[in-house]
């Protein structure tokens, strides 16, 4: 399994460094913490921006039992890259190519009898059994069958199992509020999930793997781990419960570092307006560093004048508006020069900022910070194994 890195030509203007050793450590930590439950590492959305294929490979090396993705396309891309282990996808649309899923030995999820009918149709047309999981909606009100529709979905699945058209490999649900451990919805969802499992049991069906937890649930609700936990964010070293525990407290190391080099510095006078709209005005004569990344590279405009950056080893704040290709930092009297390193976020060592801090500054979640960053950043994976390199 390998993936071409972004084309390299000329000096590195800006790069995303993905530390696969950190990812492996996080995966081992999660596997140890959640054992005897098995671990699914969620690699959807290009591995939360970290690169799906290299992340998937490192996750398997570190002991991920399953990989999880949203779309069938993502699952097929894993197969095309050589992954042969269990893979679950969970977001189909009408007309989904379930025959391709069967061909690739990918587990698919049905939320409704309409989806089940399509899956069964593919199994009949192709011959053989589709690997199927069922999702019950226990309160997120997103995917999954409602409690009202669940018995029908279970009954139809039992018929398909008896006809040898599907193999039921799992029954699962998803938390709405697990990032807030005290939220009453967590307990309510656990009870609703247990009730849904009773329906499966009463239908005489073996549910296969039972799973309910995302990263936050896996780390805060041991009683809800069942047979498998699905960890995305925590695998990437970010805290899924940032208001309660830092990634460090959870024993996790952020995997992605976003860095750039200073393109230019200049002296400006007191009262100079920086960037569009002059929303930032210098208080005294100062040095301004131009950093060649912007919202065209996924740096949020909401970071304007609030997000932390580390310039030449010193912590600063973005000064004025983030532009499409660049942003500015008022570095005061610091002797910064073109070519000096700028860290937007990373592991947080040496006082450097983290994706979580960017999220807080921008009024969003760390998931969005790492998943949306990209654009013209060059992505480089560190600590690939011999085979990958
Ligand atoms: C994205 C996703 C996950 C992973 O969630 P994290 O909070 O990143 O651990 C787990 N399960 C499902 C169904 C998802 O869509």
Image (tube, grey):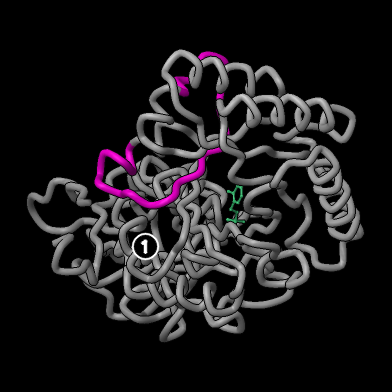
Give left or right: position of 234 versus 253: right
Q: Is residue 67 above or below residue 339?
A: above
Q: Identify residue for label 1.
A: 60
Quarter of the rendering containing residue 245: bottom right
Question: Residue drawn at (45%, 13%), measured in percent from left and top?
Answer: 125
Predominant secondary structure in magenta? loop
Q: Please state the horizontal and vertical placement of residue 185, each as a whole percent of the image.
A: 88, 54
Task: Give the quadrant of the C terminus.
Answer: bottom left
Q: Please state the horizontal and vertical placement of residue 60, each as a whole percent of the image.
A: 36, 62
Is residue 46 magenta-colored? Answer: no
**Label 1 crowding class (10 Å Cα cut-off): few <14, some 14-19, many 20+?**
some
Quarter of the rendering containing residue 46: top left
Q: Foreground residue, 336 or 12?
A: 12
Q: How many marks?
A: 1
Is residue 85 magenta-colored? Answer: yes
For numbered disc 1, what is the local secondary structure?
A: helix
Give left or right: position of 59 versus 321: left
Q: Foreground residue, 308 or 30?
A: 30
Question: Residue drawn at (67%, 17%), measured in percent from left and top?
Answer: 114
Question: Residue drawn at (50%, 53%), measured in percent from left and top?
Answer: 42
Q: Please state the horizontal and vertical placement of residue 37, each as a whole percent of the image.
A: 61, 68
Q: Is residue 253 visible?
A: yes
Question: Residue drawn at (73%, 72%), measured in percent from left and top?
Answer: 222
Q: Foreground residue, 332 or 132?
A: 132
Q: Foreground residue, 357 or 176?
A: 176
Magenta-colored span: 77-98
Quarter of the rendering containing residue 17: bottom left
Give left or right: position of 347 versus 143: left
Q: Is residue 283 visible?
A: no
């Amino acid at each position: 399994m390998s993936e071409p890195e972004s084309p390299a030509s000329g000096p590195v203007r800006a790069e995303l460094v993905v530390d696969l050793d950190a990812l492996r450590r996080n995966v081992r930590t999660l596997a140890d913490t959640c054992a005897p439950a098995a671990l699914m590492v969620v690699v959807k959305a290009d591995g939360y921006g970290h690169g799906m294929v290299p992340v998937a490979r490192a996750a398997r090396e570190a002991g991920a039992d399953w990989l999880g993705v949203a779309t069938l396309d993502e699952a097929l891309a894993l197969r095309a890259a050589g992954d042969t282990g269990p893979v679950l996808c969970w977001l189909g649309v009408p007309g989904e190519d379930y025959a391709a899923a069967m061909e690739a030995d990918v587990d698919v999820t049905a939320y409704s009898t309409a989806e089940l009918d399509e899956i069964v149709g593919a199994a009949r047309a192709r011959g053989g059994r589709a690997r199927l999981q069922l999702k019950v909606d226990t309160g997120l009100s997103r995917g999954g069958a409602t409690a009202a529709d669940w018995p029908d979905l279970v009954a139809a699945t039992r018929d398909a199992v008896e006809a040898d058209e599907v193999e039921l490999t799992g029954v699962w649900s998803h938390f709405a509020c697990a990032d807030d451990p005290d939220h009453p919805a967590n307990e309510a969802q656990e009870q609703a999930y247990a009730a849904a499992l009773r329906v499966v049991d009463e239908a005489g069906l073996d549910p296969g793997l039972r799973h309910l937890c995302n990263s936050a649930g896996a780390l805060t609700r041991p009683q809800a781990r069942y047979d498998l936990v699905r960890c995305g964010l925590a695998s990437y070293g970010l805290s899924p419960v940032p208001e309660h525990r830092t990634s460090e407290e959870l024993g996790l190391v952020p995997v992605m570092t976003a860095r750039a080099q200073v393109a230019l510095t200049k002296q400006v006078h007191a009262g100079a307006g920086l960037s569009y709209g002059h929303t930032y005005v210098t208080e005294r004569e100062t040095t301004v560093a131009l950093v060649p990344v912007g919202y065209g590279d996924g740096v949020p405009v909401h970071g304007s004048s609030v997000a932390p950056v580390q310039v030449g080893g010193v912590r600063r704040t973005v000064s004025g508006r983030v532009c499409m290709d660049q942003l500015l930092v008022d570095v005061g009297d610091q002797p910064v020069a073109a070519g000096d390193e700028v860290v937007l976020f990373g592991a947080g060592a040496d006082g450097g900022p983290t994706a979580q801090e960017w999220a807080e500054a921008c009024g969003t979640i760390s998931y969005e910070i790492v998943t949306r960053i990209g654009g013209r950043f060059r992505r480089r994976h560190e600590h690939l194994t011999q085979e990958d390199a």
